[in-house]
Image: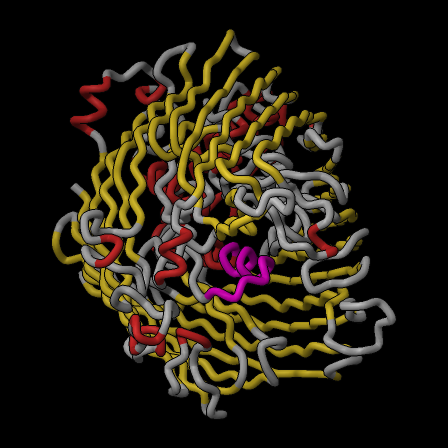
């Protein structure tokens, strides 16, 4: 163990006196604590930027509500740090698995913590981690651990109502077209409307309903004349019902197994600035409150405990899936026709007649379970099974890269996952198979070498023929197939205010991928050094580079319809500076510069600089604003930047080409329980670039967005 032997001989009185000094210091700094998840927290912003930048998604908005929603619960009813399980601490996203293991070991050796501030004496816990965690945890007070009647939870629960409106002001081409122009036009207005009601009592009770209309979708008109909103989601979730029933989920809910090789619908760390935090985790069942129209289950599920060590989770789900339907004609009988599916849509957009025709055109049934064995919060082993049935067969396009993808109506997956902690070593992994014989596996090790050094290793080997429709494990690409690689992550804490994070990942794709017409390989590294000081100052320098193959459109290949694959290198450097001028005014600056280099396009380069100002006084009004300038040679050199959006509606925007970007957000909290917000943002391309493409094209070199939101908590 990393704890010094002398620690066990010290009287608790000495600890209490030490804590009194630490407590005084932290209370004196109370005004400088982070504003909280959803309210411009730097930790949250960095994770959001990392997740979206790593997905290579071109969208300019990313809903991150679900990942941090739990913390809002703990802000109102803090988690008892002396009773919290490994999974509960892991689910907060605030600590690394290495820190969690060290916390639990310390807690067991000392018989519990006397104060939240005692976290500071635990190896691996820097002041920043303690300050972040202290907002959401408590020591003692076991009221939440007792069985609470449902009537009391309904009466004393926290209720919240969200109403949000957003719109782009420039008129896109899709809104100017009509039926006379064919089937490619928008049926509805450019407004995005979102509403949600939710009531919850700690983690014991949650129920609510969410509704959303995306831009271009009809609202109480056309295909939604009777339905109103295009998407609805409702859930009812009970936790810790009694010693046997640990969870009951009805309606919409999220399910996650192991390391994500067969099923994962929660948030999982990938390659990010949290370089040693690489393992998936959290409970199997969770309430679902987001608006992703594909990544959830709809039906019922439950988790049952059989004693202290054995736990069984089972679920069943039936929901409509948006899919591209085709007619398949039997060549032996031209009159026999069956429907087939060429792709499953995950965008959730139902704006045009064609998209509406595909909406919920097939039925997807999922069923499965997870049997988990836990011993002393050190060992966990899980056996997971998932079955999937599609009402119409999946018949992918006849392309070489689709050769090993799942096709048909029924798919069965099974896996065995594990996690074992020995002193400061945490081993984790999962071995999975699909019913066609394909195999995928991932194994990792997270080590706390001493108080100042953490290291993580991850090996993955996802077979070319492995098939899973809901997989989302750690890796370079999503889907958990056709990839193998080795990852090394490092975190150093060389001084009180210094932190160094780095990783190196090497990977290989043994078979073809979309637009990649040959096996390929690559590597990536990231290095960041951070200096921070009592939440007054945080600055870091980051270098990041990735090299991997990409497809071309040349005639050099001797194979028909196959294009050569060449390596492309993307390099980015970032200097970030944040300074809290006083208790209510914060100034942030950032400079990004980088290039993309390959033998086909040569070297493309660019830079971005922004200046933020955040004004958050104790009064009713607060605001955030930004002015950014960017100049790049195109989309290949893009810089993903977090923008302060409406509460719990995170935004990450890629800056590329040449132009400016500005936003202004104002928030009002002068009425008890009510938060009102307004936001306006504009991108202006000074090089004449037209905003949008296809039906989203405006013909103008600018894109202006407006939004407003009201949140009522009662």
Counting from the top left corner in percent of width and height, residue 494 is at: 68, 54
Of residues 642 and 226, the one nearer the viewer is 226
Of residues 7 and 468, the one nearer the viewer is 468
Q: Residue at x 18, y 19 (%)?
A: 151
Q: Which residues are magenta?
A: 47-59
Counting from the top left corner in percent of width and height, residue 70 is at: 39, 39
Figure quadrant of the C terminus: top left
Q: Residue at x 47, y 78 (%)?
A: 610
- The image quarter in which residue 207 lies: top left
Colouring scheme, one of rainbow, by chain, secondary structure, one colour? secondary structure
Of residues 373 and 17, the one nearer the viewer is 373
As drawn, is 353 to the left or to the right of 557? left
As drawn, is 610 to the left or to the right of 36? right
Q: Does the magenta portion include 55?
A: yes
- The image quarter in which residue 636 lies: bottom right
Q: Residue at x 56, y 22 (%)?
A: 370
Counting from the top left corner in percent of width and height, residue 433 is at: 71, 31
**Main structural element of the magenta stretch: helix, strand or loop?**
helix
Query: Would you place residue 99 above or below residue 516 in this image?
Result: above
Figure quadrant of the N terminus: top right
Query: Would you place residue 561 above or below residue 338 in this image?
Result: below
Query: Would you place residue 354 above or below residue 630 in this image?
Result: above
Q: Does the magenta portion include 581?
A: no
As drawn, is 306 to the left or to the right of 411? left
Q: Residue furthest left?
A: 671
């Amino acid at each position: 163990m990393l704890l010094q032997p002398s620690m066990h001989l010290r009287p608790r009185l000495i600890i209490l006196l030490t804590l009194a000094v630490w407590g005084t210091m932290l209370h004196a700094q109370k005004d400088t604590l982070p504003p909280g998840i959803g309210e411009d927290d730097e930790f949250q912003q960095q994770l959001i930027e990392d997740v979206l930048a790593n997905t290579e998604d071109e969208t300019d908005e990313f809903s991150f509500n679900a990942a941090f929603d739990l913390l809002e619960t703990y802000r109102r009813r803090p988690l008892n740090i002396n009773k919290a399980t490994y999974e509960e601490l892991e689910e907060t996203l605030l600590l690394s698995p290495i820190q969690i293991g060290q916390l639990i070991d310390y807690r067991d050796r000392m018989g519990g913590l006397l104060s939240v501030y005692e976290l500071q004496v635990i190896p691996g816990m820097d002041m920043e981690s303690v300050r972040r965690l202290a907002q959401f945890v408590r020591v003692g007070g076991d009221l939440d651990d007792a069985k609470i009647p449902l009537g009391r939870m309904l009466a004393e629960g926290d209720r919240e109502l969200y109403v949000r409106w957003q719109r782009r002001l420039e008129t896109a081409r899709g809104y100017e077209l009509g039926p006379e122009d064919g089937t490619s036009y928008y049926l509805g207005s450019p407004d995005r409307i979102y509403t949600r009601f939710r009531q919850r009592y700690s983690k014991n009770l949650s129920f609510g309903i969410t509704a959303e209309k995306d831009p271009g979708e009809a609202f109480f008109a056309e295909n939604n004349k009777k339905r109103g909103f295009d998407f609805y989601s409702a859930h009812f979730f009970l936790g810790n019902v009694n010693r046997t029933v640990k969870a009951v989920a009805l309606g919409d809910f999220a399910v996650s197994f192991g390391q994500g090789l067969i099923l994962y619908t929660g948030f999982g760390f990938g390659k990010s600035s949290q370089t040693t935090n690489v393992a998936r985790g959290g409970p199997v069942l969770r309430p679902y409150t987001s608006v992703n129209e594909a990544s959830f289950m709809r039906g019922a599920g439950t988790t049952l405990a059989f004693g202290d060590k054995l736990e069984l989770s089972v679920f069943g789900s039936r929901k409509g899936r948006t899919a591209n339907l085709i007619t398949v004609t039997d060549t032996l009988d031209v009159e026999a026709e069956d429907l087939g599916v060429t792709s499953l849509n995950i965008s959730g957009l139902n704006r045009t007649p064609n998209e509406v025709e595909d909406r919920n055109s097939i039925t997807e049934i999922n069923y499965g379970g997870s049997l988990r064995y836990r011993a002393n919060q050190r060992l966990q082993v899980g056996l997971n099974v998932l079955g999937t049935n599609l009402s119409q067969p999946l018949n992918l396009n006849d392309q070489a890269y689709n050769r090993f993808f799942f096709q048909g109506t029924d798919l069965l997956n099974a896996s065995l996952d594990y996690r074992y902690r020995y002193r400061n070593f945490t081993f984790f992994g999962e071995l999975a198979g699909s019913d066609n014989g394909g195999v995928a596996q991932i194994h990792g090790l997270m080590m706390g070498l001493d108080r100042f050094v953490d290291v993580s290793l991850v090996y993955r080997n996802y077979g070319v023929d492995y098939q899973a429709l809901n997989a989302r494990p750690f890796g370079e690409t999503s889907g958990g197939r056709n990839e193998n690689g080795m990852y090394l992550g490092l975190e150093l804490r060389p001084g009180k205010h210094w932190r160094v994070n780095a990783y190196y990942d090497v990977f290989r794709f043994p078979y073809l991928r979309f637009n990649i017409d040959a096996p390929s390989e690559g590597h990536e590294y990231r290095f960041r050094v951070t200096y921070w000081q009592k939440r007054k100052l945080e600055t870091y320098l980051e270098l990041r580079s990735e090299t991997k193959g990409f497809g071309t459109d040349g005639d050099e290949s001797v194979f028909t319809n196959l294009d050569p694959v060449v390596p492309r290198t993307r390099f980015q450097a970032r200097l970030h500076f944040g300074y809290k001028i006083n208790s209510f005014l914060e100034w942030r600056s950032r400079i990004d510069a980088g290039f993309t280099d390959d033998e086909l396009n040569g070297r493309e380069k660019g830079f971005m600089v922004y200046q933020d100002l955040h004004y958050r006084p104790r009064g009713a009004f607060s605001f955030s604003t930004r002015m950014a300038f960017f100049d790049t040679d195109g989309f290949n050199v893009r810089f993903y930047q977090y923008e302060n959006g409406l509460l719990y509606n995170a935004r990450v925007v890629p800056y590329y080409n040449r132009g400016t970007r500005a936003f202004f957000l104002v928030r009002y909290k002068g009425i008890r329980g009510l938060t009102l917000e307004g936001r306006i943002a504009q991108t202006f391309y000074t090089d004449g670039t037209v905003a949008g493409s296809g039906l989203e094209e405006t013909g103008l070199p600018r894109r202006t967005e407006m939004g407003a939101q009201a949140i009522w908590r009662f």
